[in-house]
Image: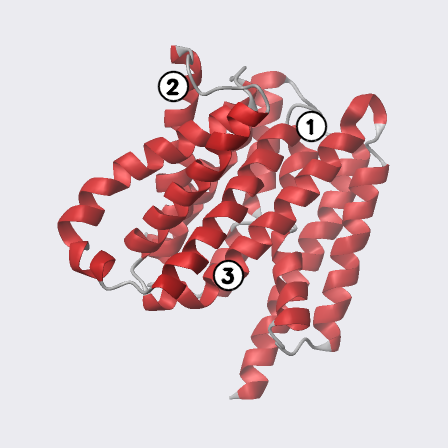
Amino acid sequence: MKKIIIILGVLGTAFSAILVRYSDAPSTVLVFYRMLFSVLLLSPAALLFHKREFTGIGLREIGLCVGSGIFLGMHFFCYFQSLQYTGIASSVVLVDTEVFFVALGGALFLRERLSALGWLSILITFAGSVVVVLGDMGGGRMTGNILALCGAVCSAVYTLIGRSYRRRMSTTVYTWIVYFSAGMVVLPASFLTGNPVLPVSLRNLAVAMGLAVLCTLLGHSIFSWGLKYESASFISVVKLLEPVFASLLGILLFREMPAVTSVAGGILIIGGIVLCIVSGQRGNADSR
């Protein structure tokens, strides 16, 4: 039953690309309201059950959580913006290369050992990204693909920063600070780019609420909950269903057939990520 709930969480995150297509709001505005609604929905639980934890957080922890939130906000901006230029399949597949960048960043900056199999997985994932980007360049799609890759990098930095501090803090407190910070970083960006957050249409507010509920609370938060019951590798593998779900929804709702290069590159990317997860499991087993 828990595995089914986690899979449904992946389906929730897959709706992100679909909901963004129904909005005509600038990306910064949409990200702001998604984070605003996420914070508001989390606030009752955070204040009722974690008030003491909030008062005990040190300045270093707050600073790193804020930094994590800044990169999360940048991730959402790049991801949403990419969907205005490229296809759903290409965007979601490229954004999911986050796992590849996390592995690479961990090896380069956190001195985490990476096996030969791990480096091979990185090369395969990189090759798949090249296939998707170079094979889908027409009509401004190159811009969208590059934005999606930037979104993956930002998400990887967010993950790397939060990896250790999520163990010291409850999920509710950590995500509340991160979501609040993400919203605050895109707020001035909205005004600087000439896209103030007010006024906003009811349609765009509804899309933002859908993103907050389906994709944030019933998506990303489900993964955090699932880590108590399932292995991180299981959740990482299951999250690879997101491009599949998103592509199927794109076909059903928008009749948007993915390009052959997107499918081929996506298979390479997913294969590389699975190989990366397998190499991580072997590395953990060897270190015991």
| Residue 121 drawn at (x, y percent) | 73, 64
Sequence-earlier tag: 2 or 1: 1
Q: Amino acid at mark 3?
A: Ile
Q: Which residue in the rendered view is the most extreme toward the bottom?
A: 288
Q: Are marks 2 and 1 in contact (CB under 8 Å)?
A: no
| Residue 46 drawn at (x, y percent) | 22, 48
* Label 3 CA crowd tier, 10 Å (few <14, some 14–19, many 20+): some
Corner quadrant of residue 272: bottom right
Corner quadrant of residue 59: bottom left
Q: Residue at x 64, y 70 (%)?
A: 109
Residue of label 1 = 87
| Residue 52 drawn at (x, y percent) | 16, 59
> SS at mark 2?
helix
> SS at mark 3?
helix
Which label sits on residue 206?
2
> SS at mark 1?
loop
Q: Nearer the viewer, mark 1 or mark 3?
A: 3
| Residue 219 drawn at (x, y percent) | 41, 42
Q: Are marks 1 and 3 in contact (CB under 8 Å)?
A: no
**Left or right, residue 186 beside residue 279:** left
Residue 15 vs 126, above or below: the answer is above
Q: Is residue 234 visible?
A: no
Q: Residue at x 48, y 39 (%)?
A: 185
Residue of label 3 = 161
Sequence-earlier tag: 3 or 2: 3
Q: Nearer the viewer, mark 2 or mark 1?
A: 2
**Left or right, residue 263 beside residue 288:** right
**Left or right, residue 192 beside residue 45:** right
Q: Nearer the viewer, residue 75 or 255?
A: 75
Q: Are marks 3 and 2 in contact (CB under 8 Å)?
A: no
Q: CA distance from mark 3 to mark 2?
A: 31 Å
Q: Amino acid at mark 2?
A: Ala
